[in-house]
Amino acid sequence: MLYKLEKPDLSKVKTEKTAAILAPILLKNDPVMFKHVEEVNEPYLYWDKIKYNSASEGITPEGFWMMVKYIRKGNMKQTAIRSEDGKYFTWFKLPILDKILHDIDFDCGANMLSTGRHDNAKEDKIYVYRGIIEEAIASSQLEGASTTRKAAKQFLTEGRKPKNKSEHMILNNFNAMQAIESDYKNKELSFSLLLEMHSLITKETIENEAQGRLRRDDEKVVVSDTAEDIIYHIPPQMTFVQEQLSVLMDFANNKLTEPFIHPVLKAIMLHFWMGYLHPFVDGNGRIARLLFYWYLLRGNYWTFAYLPISKAIRNSPKQYGMAYVYSEQDDNDMTYFIDYNVRKIIFAEQEFKKYLAEKSRENAMIHRPAAAKYGLNDRQIQLIQYYVGNKGRYSTIEMHINANRISRMTAFNDLKRLETAGFIKSHKRGRNVYYYSTEKINELFINDQK
């Protein structure tokens, strides 16, 4: 069954009365009613969320909705994105959006990192690695990967081979994010690059024949809730998809003649566009989110590599799906999707700042003279902090390499010196060596914070 949004019955709206109320709002002479309209635009709400709210005794919910739609349509901007019926998607630049985008620009510079220690390129690599791991896990979980975050993070940091489809999905996403950060961000988007990305994220998860190619019309692909037998989106026919992919690539490569659109908004639009076209048999959501990162990293929004947006989306997957549905079924109004994603970016930034503040607090707990006495470097101190926060857990050379993006020899020397100093002890099991902490690590912490 195809899901359809509930629509208000506007036939019972007294248009003359509504127009009489609307005029003062447009002139901003009715601050109370104007405030009601602003409240349903920030966040951007559909009829099903506002129909029970009485804006005024003098107007019905349907009449209020008609006014909201009139104001929205009067401020719409057309995008390059078209639906299969030939209509363009539009968006409403909310009054608060300029401030939000300004804050994102500001936070995506050095300011975001001022809360914690951020001294050099080595720390850049650590933050990027953390962000890529979190994004790879969350993006895969959104697509059905059943592995827990804790287990997934451990298998990635240990560098072991995936054991099942869920782990393959996560590893593929991790490799694709790394490829974007190190290589793809330097390339224009092309069919070959898009297919290469798809091959990367679907390796060992779908039939080889379906990897790195567009779907066919005889392959029935839909976005659905199988538990409730509800279809939320039927992708367009492939003739239309292939035509639109060419336009999408020109848009992504900034080759279209169009008014300026903020890079963050363009990245969100690419995310939506790929999700709407659904050009592959599988992996469309992951590809859509990869394009979001590709566009921003290509545009030098480098701190987005630190921000796992999918982790924020994972906390509200139903809202994420409905942002697509509202955008498609409410007159191609993409503002729903933009509003949802901008808020998730803000949330991801806030979470990253909390993480930096926590790392700063942990650094303050280390007794620096004691650390200096043993000649510990920052990597070794971070490892000791890991042990303190993860009682009974182990580390390995592979985990230390991956966490710090260092060579095997450097990792071996770090661990050997910690073991020689008595802070860790090694246990060999088979071919693997596991390192556990000892009680001596307490010497490194300030007494009143043990």
Image: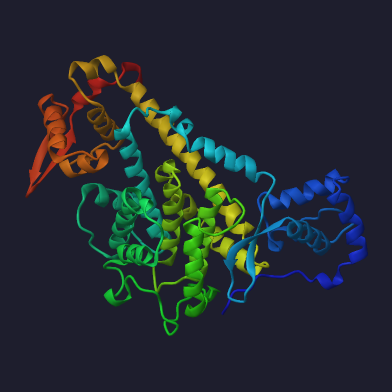
Q: Nearer the viewer, residue 296 or 414?
A: 296
**In this orientation, does residue 225 appear?**
no
Q: Is residue 404 above or below residue 261?
A: above
Q: Position of residue 105 (x, y in %)?
A: 53, 39
Left or right relative to 53: residue 295: left
Q: Residue at x 48, y 38 (%)?
A: 108
Q: Position of residue 318 (x, y in %)?
A: 53, 61
Q: Nearer the viewer, residue 200 or 344?
A: 200
**In this orientation, does residue 425 appear?**
yes
How many numbered discs sit on the rendered protein?
Answer: 0
Left or right relative to 200: residue 72: right
Q: Is residue 267 above or below residue 419?
A: below
Q: Is residue 250 above or below residue 158?
A: below
Quarter of the image holding residue 89?
Answer: bottom right
Q: Nearer the viewer, residue 234 or 242?
A: 242
Q: Position of residue 170 (x, y in %)?
A: 32, 58
Q: Residue at x 45, y 81 (%)?
A: 220
Q: Position of residue 25 (x, y in %)?
A: 85, 50
Quarter of the image holding residue 188?
Answer: bottom left
